[in-house]
Image (tube, rainbow, N blue to C red):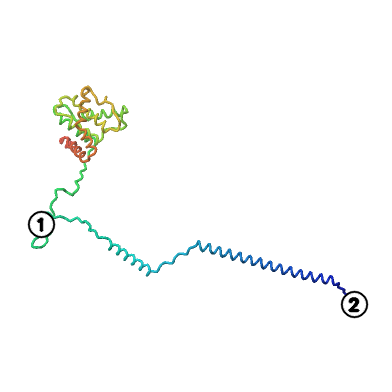
Amino acid sequence: MGTILSISPATKKASIMDAELAAGDGQKNDKSLKRHSMFVSLSWRKLVSNSGKKSAKKVTPNPLPAPANQVAQLNSENIRKTHKTDEKKPKVPIPVPVPTVPTQNKDALVQNGKLSTAQKQPSSLSLVSPRRIVIQASTGELLRCLGDFMCRRCFKLKELKSSDVILWFRNIDRTLLLQGWQDQGFITPANVVFVYLLCEDTIEDSVDTAAELQGTFQTCLYLSYSYMGNEISYPLKPFMIEANKDVFWETALRIIDRLSAKMLQLNSDPHFFTEVFQDLKNQRDTTEANLDR
């Protein structure tokens, strides 16, 4: 027995149409894929080309160094140009100082048609710097020199000793320290030299009483403290005594009027200070100095 399959024409036609539709859809999909891939490839090429242009704009390659022959040629051309510009400029003579020869030495310079060397003339101005003198002395030694000077100047006062002058000086300095008028002592080598400058010009050899000498000496001390001291002002009581009460300001103004320039010079001119320092040191009694040795 055999089996017979019967296929209707409608179904066959429908299947044929379905196959054709499926084939058409496949072709459409292939075309759309092809178009999509073409668009993607074109957009990628545009992006690559644009990025290449931007990078070409931003990045500038370093110029290759010129060869050595070209550099030498450029240097030679620059040198020629500078020489040409220098030749075009007008030449102005440069002023040069011409040494002059004194007329009295012309005969000595030219002898028998030959030039002879001129001898160096001695100059009155010495080019050698002055010798530096170093003088050293302690405060006690300078005080002793000051006392010896007072005793030598006031020879009429037979009982006067150098220790008396030193005691007057130290008592005033100690009083100012105890009363709080100064924070540190005034007696230093430089201040003793200043006191000697005032006393040497003020104290006269006609003094015949110790009270008068003490009054004049303490007036000099007051001016020395006012000028050289660390404080702004000092009281009058330790410096003024009965012997100089009436003539204290008169003596002070006379000293200021006469020695104001020397007071300034002593602080500004080291040579003048050295001279006064040496003069004070020379006032030491030679017999006492030998006994100290």
**Residue count near mark 1 (Cα–Cα under 10 Å), binned few <14, some 14–19, many ≥20:** few
Nearer-N-terminus badge (2/1): 2
| Residue at mark 2 | 2
Query: Vertical placement of 186 versus 52: above or below?
Result: above
Q: Are marks 2 and 1 in contact (CB under 8 Å)?
A: no
Seen from the viewer's position, the closer of residues 100 and 143 is 100
Q: Residue 238's quadrant in the figure?
A: top left
Query: What's the amino acid at mark 1?
Result: Lys
Q: In the image, is 9 to the left or to the right of 162?
A: right
**Residue count near mark 2 (Cα–Cα under 10 Å), binned few <14, some 14–19, many ≥20:** few
| Residue at mark 1 | 106
Query: What's the amino acid at mark 2?
Result: Gly
Q: How many marks?
A: 2
Location of residue 267 in the rendering, given as x and y in whole percent from the top left corner: 24, 37
Location of residue 122 in the rendering, given as x and y in whole percent from the top left corner: 13, 51
Residue extending furthest toward the bottom: 1
Disc 2 to disc 1, C-alpha distance: 165 Å
Seen from the viewer's position, the closer of residues 268 and 63 is 63
Residue at horizontal 10 percent and vertical 60 percent from the top: 110
The quarter in which the C terminus is drawn is: top left
Query: Vertical placement of 135 versus 89: above or below?
Result: above
As helix, strand or loop, the secondary structure at mark 1 comes to helix
Residue at horizontal 12 percent and vertical 53 percent from the top: 121
Seen from the viewer's position, the closer of residues 167 and 19 is 19
Q: Residue 245's quadrant in the figure?
A: top left
Residue at horizontal 10 percent and vertical 54 percent from the top: 103
Location of residue 23 in the rendering, given as x and y in whole percent from the top left corner: 75, 70
Q: Residue 192's quadrant in the figure?
A: top left
Q: Which mark is residue 52?
A: none
